[in-house]
Image (cartoon, helix red, strand yellow):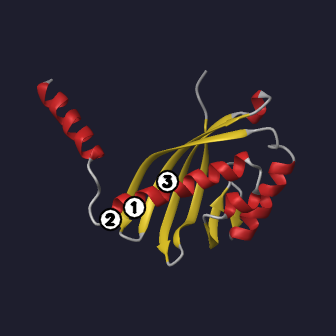
Amino acid sequence: MKTLIFMTLLMLGFQTMPLPDGRTADEAALRESVKQLETGWNTKSGALFAKPFAEDADYVIINGNYLKGRSAIESGHQRIFDTIYKDTTLSLTVKQIRFLRSDVAVVHVSGHRDGPTKELMGDAMMSLTMTKEQQGWRIAAFQNTSVTTKQ
């Protein structure tokens, strides 16, 4: 039991320490990209939602369909913002950031969508593969998976 408590405290301590090699700034930039997704959704702006994506990004929609490229992501989201999801809000929480290399990170994000009806509400887990480009961190690949809760 003492070992478990020590390991838990040790892990919590490491989580609050700055990351090496300037990763604190990179982590903040990654979190800002996720915040931009949330802001784009909540302001119903396809352009703002799509801004953090790479020009040639791959996007797997929550229903399993696939979009290719920032412009398709922008127009597809603008369509749903103007119609079915116009009265919804989205809350995103970064759960984990894992640097695969100094210029590649995997970001896991949990999301909750609120809406006026039960059908428009839902939870999801998103996996973002992000790359560090000259213009900053960009989402190269995005996988959106519905989370179902057992009742």
Nearer the camera: disc 1 or disc 3: 1
* Contact between labelled residues 1 and 2, with CB atoms less than 8 Å apart: yes
- Give residue 133's position: percent from left, percent from top: 50, 76
Q: Would residue 101 be seen by someone viewing this image from the given angle?
A: yes
- Give residue 116's position: percent from left, percent from top: 80, 29
Q: Which residue is mark 1?
A: 25
Give the residue at x 78% y 59%. 76
Q: Front-most of 39 and 147?
A: 39
Residue 31: give its label: 3
Amino acid type at image mark 2: Gly
Q: Looking at the image, which residue sits at the far top? A: 151
Secondary structure under tag 3 reads: helix
Q: Label 3, label 2: how many angstroms apart (C-alpha)?
A: 15 Å
Instruction: Report the side of 53 relative to 80 (left or right).
Output: left
Secondary structure under tag 1 reads: helix
Q: Would residue 63 be seen by someone viewing this image from the given angle?
A: no
- Give residue 84's position: percent from left, percent from top: 84, 43
Between disc 1 and disc 3, whose residue precedes? 1
Amino acid type at image mark 1: Ala
Instruction: Report the side of 89 relative to 128 (left or right).
Output: right
Q: Quadrant of the C terminus?
A: top right
Amino acid type at image mark 3: Arg
Q: Which residue is mark 2?
A: 22
Between disc 3 and disc 2, whose residue precedes? 2
